[in-house]
Amino acid sequence: MPEAWVPPDVGHGIALRPWHSGDLDALVAHANDEQVSHGTSDRFPYPYTREDGVAFLAGRVVDLSAPVFAITLDEHAIGGIGVRTFAGERRIGAEFGYWLGSRHWGRGIMTRVVAAFAPWVMDALELQRLQATVLDFNHASARVLEKNGFSEEGVLRRAVHKRGSVHDLRMFARLRVH
């Protein structure tokens, strides 16, 4: 993997770039939101503290040498997107995830981000398959994926315990077109 990734252009004042220490305040401001954390994995805690942000920006939560980017609007971090590649015989695939500060929901930002990121990361990593899981109640995230050529492949029933409830996980994937 290259040390420095050059993320794809999104446009409309939206950009992707590597996270840096100057993003700490914006990261904590957007991540410390119960609505945001409700739809993410438990690696994304609530409440989200400055210590959580420092750990993330230091690469102790996810591998920041992989394509893991801040989503910025007018140069201010408002969310994140990243990919985790698989290994061994599954190395032709990867899983990705994303989040966006709730004050920016419903504006088409994530749809545009995924439209730029998904084909770029598939080419950059030479992937045959890019997948994402979505909690059963997160209809907006499922729509983002569907609008960007991801197909729902199935449901992992009763797969997640989140905030006192058991949820299904919907599996989406986009395959390389030959």
Image (tube, rainbow, N blue to C red):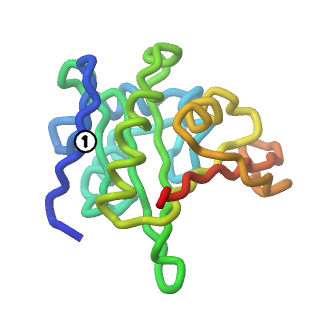
At a point 43% along the width and 65% down the height, the residue shown is 127
At a point 43% along the width and 63% down the height, the residue shown is 84
Q: Is residue 128 left or right of residue 169?
A: left
**Residue 124's x, y, as percent?**
29, 60
At a point 49% along the width and 21% down the height, the residue shown is 102
Q: Is residue 171 left or right of residue 23?
A: right
> Compared to 157, does 115 lie above or below?
above
> Compared to 56, does 80 lie above or below?
above
Count of marks overlaid on the render:
1
At a point 66% along the width and 44% down the height, the residue shown is 134
**Residue 42's x, y, as percent?**
58, 51
**Residue 167's x, y, as percent?**
80, 46
Q: Residues within 10 Å of mark 1 (few under 14, many from 20)?
A: some
Residue closer to the observer: 118 or 109: 118
Which of the 4 image quadrants contains residue 100? top left
Give the structural element (helix, strand or loop) at label 1. loop
Tell me which amino acid carries mark 1.
Pro
Q: Which residue is mark 1?
A: 8
Residue at far front of view:
178
Q: Is residue 19 left or right of residue 89?
A: left
Residue closer to the observer: 136 or 50: 136
Which of the 4 image quadrants contains residue 3? bottom left
Which image quarter is the N terminus in?
A: bottom left
Q: Is residue 178 left or right of residue 34?
A: left
**Residue 44's x, y, as percent?**
50, 46
Residue closer to the observer: 91 or 31: 91
Residue at far bottom of view:
88
